[in-house]
Amino acid sequence: MLKIPISKDGFYFEAHQKLRPVDFATEGVFVAGSAHWPKFMDECIAQGSGAASRALTIISKPALSSEGIVATVNETYCDGCGVCEGCCEYNAIEIVTLEDGKSRKSVVNAGLCKGCGSCVAACPSGAMEQKGFKNSQIQAELDAFLDFPVGG
């Protein structure tokens, strides 16, 4: 559920043994105590304090900044089919019913979106795009590449 790697013995792996000993590869999730591996109580307490301190570095900030590359919805093309919501690994997309009570549209929570692009690839109507990787930008890159002379 949290996309956290587990060892063959059933314990959790940290992001980096020396540089990030209480962090997981998933942002905002931390490991401490016997979930990491069997250890003595004093080590568990020390690691728990480290995990709490690490969590405070995130929640003590006045605002959460997200990645620059996140998914966006072009509401003109979105028909609210829900394909993007089903394929989002980070639960960043929600299908909402508009005021008219009939139309449904996708809404992206930029704080949860990691910019993986799976929703963009899955969207049958082409309504999902990524900031910095809009369909028109990618098409322009492909056109420029195909117009480039070979060997020159």
Image: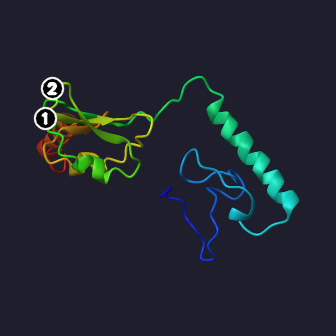
Q: From what the image shows, is residue 29 above or below residue 106?
A: below
Indicate the quadrant where residue 108 lies.
Answer: top left
Side (left or right) of 93 relative to 24? left
Q: How is the image coloured?
A: rainbow
Q: Which residue is mark 2?
A: 100
Image quadrant occupied by the C terminus: top left
In the image, 17 versus 12, the foreground residue is 12
**Camera-side residue of 98 and 152:** 98
Label disc, if present, on residue 59 of the rendered structure: none
Q: Residue at x 44, y 40 (%)?
A: 112
What residue is rendered at 19% in x and 50% in y? Answer: 151
Q: Position of residue 36 (x, y in %)?
A: 69, 63
- Farthest right residue? 42
Q: Is residue 28 left or right of residue 31?
A: left
Q: Residue 11: x percent and y percent?
A: 64, 69
Question: In this picture, is 112 found above or below 99?
Answer: below
Left or right of residue 38, residue 139 in this image: left
Q: Is residue 124 left or right of residue 2?
A: left
What x and y, as percent, mark residue 130?
29, 38
x then y, percent, for residue 117: 31, 47
Q: Residues within 10 Å of mark 1 (few under 14, many from 20)?
A: few
All told, the count of numbered labels is 2
Q: Nearer the viewer, mark 1 or mark 2?
A: 2
- Label 1 amino acid? Tyr
Residue on which the image places disc 1 = 77
